[in-house]
Image: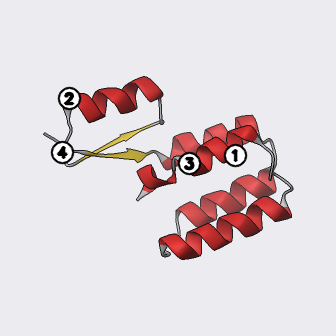
Amino acid sequence: MPQSVVTDGDKAMHKAIKTVMSNSVHRLCCWHLERNIQTNIQDGNFTRALCSSMLTYMTAEDFGLKWKNMIVKFRLNNNEWVNALYSKRKLWA
């Protein structure tokens, strides 16, 4: 069994990984995340800011603070897609 599986975050794939490869860690693919950000937000500055955050080593607490600052800066507080994306952050670790 693989120690880690990288996907685009598809719900069915997530469920299958938990069921079939329960000891594997499910991680989200940065390339897919970037494409999804571009599709759903369509703000190149936000895309760059989030991708930079994803690719920079930081503690979970630091990421949470950086995330909150980005959400305020880009006025995405009430964006359902962004809120759903943040709820998946544990898959990134």
Give the class, few, some or many, for how many residues have Cα within 10 Å of label 1's Cα (few <14, many ≥20). some
Q: Tell me the quadrant of the picture where the N terminus can be found.
A: top left
Closer to us: 40 or 20: 20
Distance between the Cα atoms at labels 4 and 1? 28 Å
Distance between the Cα atoms at labels 1 and 3? 9 Å
Give the class, few, some or many, for how many residues have Cα within 10 Å of label 2's Cα (few <14, many ≥20). few
Are discs 1 and 3 less than 8 Å apart at CB? Answer: no
Depth check, mark 3 against mark 2: the one in front is: 3
Q: Residue 79: tell me if it is visible.
A: yes
Residue 9, above or below 3? above
Q: Position of residue 55 (x, y in %)?
A: 52, 64
Distance between the Cα atoms at labels 3 and 2? 23 Å
- Three-letter amino acid code at the position of disc 1: Val
Provide the residue designation for mark 2: 20
Provide the residue designation for mark 3: 87
Image quadrant in which you'd find residue 53: bottom right
Provide the residue designation for mark 4: 23
- Three-letter amino acid code at the position of disc 2: Val
Q: Residue at x 35, y 29 (%)?
A: 15
- Whichever of labels 4 and 1 marks the residue nearer the N terminus, that label is 4
Q: Residue at x 28, y 35 (%)?
A: 18
- Whichever of labels 3 and 2 marks the residue nearer the N terminus, that label is 2
Provide the residue designation for mark 1: 82
Q: Secondary structure at mark 4?
A: loop
Are discs 2 and 1 less than 8 Å apart at CB? Answer: no
- Whichever of labels 2 and 1 marks the residue nearer the N terminus, that label is 2
Q: Furthest-left residue in view?
A: 1
Image quadrant in which you'd find residue 39: top right
Distance between the Cα atoms at labels 4 and 3? 21 Å
Q: Tell me the quadrant of the picture where the C terminus can be found.
A: bottom left
